[in-house]
Amino acid sequence: MSTLNQETRSMLEDSVNRFVQGEYTFDDRKRNLKEHQGQSPSHWQTFAEMGWLAIPFAEEQGGLGGDNTDTLGVMKGFGRGLVTEPYLGVLAAARLLALTAAQGEGAELLAGIISGTRQAVFACDEPQSRGNPLAVATRAEPDGSGYRLSGEKIAVMHSLTASHVLVSARSEGDYTDHEGIDLFLVELDSPGVDVTGYPMIDGHQGANIRFDGVAVSAAQRLTAEGEAATIILQVHSESLLMLAAEAVGIMETLVKKTVAYTRTRKQFGVALAEFQVLQHRMAEMYIETTSLANLLTQTAQRWAGADVDQQAILASKLKARLGQAARYVGQQAIQLHGGIGMTDELDIGHYFKRLTSIELQLGNAEWHRKRLWREHAA
Amino acid sequence: MTTELNTFRHQIREFIEQHADDEILEAGRKTTSFFPPFDQVMKWHRILHSQGWSAIRWPEEYGGTGWDVPRQLIFEEECRRAGVPLLLPQSISMVGPAIIHYGTDEQKRKHLPGILSGENFWAQGYSEPNAGSDLASLKCRAERDGDHYVINGSKTWTTYAHHANRLFLLVRTGGAGKPQQGISFFLIEDLTDPGIEIRPIIGLDGVPEQCDVFFTNVRVPVDCCLGEENDGWSVAKYLLEHERGGGTSFATTFRHELATIRRLAGRTGDGFGGFLADDPVFQDRYVRLHLEVDTLEATEEVFAAMEKGSPESGPMSSMIKITSMETIQRITELAIDVAGTPSLALQLAALTVASGVEPIGDDDAVTLMPKYLNNRAASIFGGSNEIQRNIIAKTLLR
């Protein structure tokens, strides 16, 4: 549960706002994409210095002693600035290490991530999983005292400087079973690990990672055999919460920018903002954005008191609602800007593309609605 | 009749199979907007021309085929079936019909053969930075100077201007009166004039398709004017009807998109151990869209039989523009929802014809995200859908 006081939270929010306004303008971002593929080492250093990498970790681990709800201000700011650094992916990996109380190599890695010197990623999605963290087809076959990992993970939120990957694999049970899932810590340059990295439409880096009979020791298994599902679910929910905050940051920005544009753009001798059909469209964008922001606030308030299953439901509600709201707001922002919204030169299209990614990542709205129905029916 | 049509279909199929080479088919597969890769689509244009099939809807006397509507549709179905790129609309479906309708004998003789053969490609210079939906407020100006006009101003969203060697252009030649008066329609033959600067615009998909075009003291002969001087708005309106509806059958193309999505859904997991194609939510979205396409086809058939420029054809073309473009937007939305996170990879090299770069992930899925992104423009270009709804409402309330 969060122990951060309001003062610390405000300080974090101020620091991210200063960063986005001062060092991460749209032009800075463009340069960062060109020179560093959107992942600048010096920005990451800033993240560490500002304490953003330490927020949801215990003080004895070198953290600030907060929880994931304390990262939401940072994520909203990252949404406004369209920050492409792999904050969400690396933090997910670190949360897994923290929750499993990893020892040895894992503990060192976690300390390195919190201090900004190391990075790791989390490989969860598979070609047929649609964001369901329990739909694990990757196999962990017992082999001597260890295992061999085989399978393919896709759409990993990738960091170009990560040394390790945390990977879910199944040693027993059926495809979507809760039981039988393990979590392994694997060096990315291990034999049999094949990383296909690529830029994504939103400027972030993605990767597909193939595991071809990768030999791992029992010590690389981070949880009791077959019992990783609970921790994976928890981190999946936490990532969804953070993703929603980023989406709110983007959508609030799009509403503001669209309103400003329609006040200045003139057609038929008057500002676009004078046309009632466009006024209603903007009112709807505001309603969708504010509804999601309110749901996020309420979810964050309920987060600490919820167990893993309840958090999964809260996260699914948020993501399902997000999918609907983000699509409408993103599409209308382009429509109301007209042709200029379709260009690479203006920021509007980039906000739209990031929203589109967010819609699809960690399970889309349809998948989450289906999960909610299953919970409801059960 | 059926036998005749079957024979006809067979002839078309055979011709396409024999003449569409791998690169042309690759360009068809890698088309992610209404504008296929330029070099390959023009190559295909020239091949079709050799058979007399480049302008199937033109009157026969100008080099058209004389086919009736069922034959036109069969031709398009076979093209979609084979996966060849659809010919660029600007020359054949837009400026061509306008020249046939408004051109002098001299203009027809001069311009139509090059359009038919694919030797010339015409870009469309309509929109300006401050004249989009409100096209009549355009400011690009042409001043009369003896036997010439001198053009100054700029155009934007000029698709494929960086590939074009011809340009049709709306310019202001007159002064007072309503904004629609005093606009002329020019046919520009020389784009190498140093006063013309063409700057490609990178789109959401990372590829240049549109362009800005700037004119500085560009001199063109007075006989470049299509229709009467200051009456270019009539030409533009006539041509916009061709652009908004009825150039080609959207329904045929959209069915092809739906078929791709259906195949993909058949092999994409639903995350619970089943396949998306068995998911009632997918099925409902799919069937709804299929019905939208079927209905669109009905409207297209009615429109095809309608006399262009009649009181009914204007609102009907607006209706086709709205329904077709919103349907394809929803189809591309379903496509990315089915494709999921694999569609987030930016794959510019794999999408380039003859690059030899294999796509990451499913072959069918690689074009789906660029199509979703590019089709956001479908409710903006050719007169935004808000403007089209205004046109329909105006007719209803008249």
Image: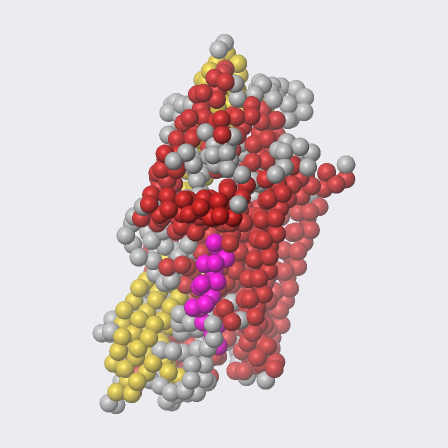
Q: In screen coordinates, is B120 left or right of B290? A: left
**Residue A239: percent from left, percent from top:** 48, 71
Residue in front for this viewpoint, B200 or A65: B200
Q: Is residue A190 above or below residue B21?
A: below
The residue range painted magenta reads B256-272
Q: Is residue B146 above or below residue A113?
A: above
Question: Residue drawn 49% across and 30% down?
Answer: B60
Query: Which color scheme did the rendering employ for the protein?
Result: secondary structure
* B316 part of magenta stretch: no
Q: Residue extending furthest left?
A: A191
- Can residue A118 be seen here? The reply is no
**Quadrant the C terminus of chain A occupies:** bottom right
The percent position of residue B57, horizontal first and vertical second, equals 51, 35
Residue at the location (42% across, 47% down)? B10
Relative depth, front residue between A29 and A288 = A288
| Of the pair B278 and B177, the residue shown nearer to us | B278
Residue A35 x %, y %: 33, 52
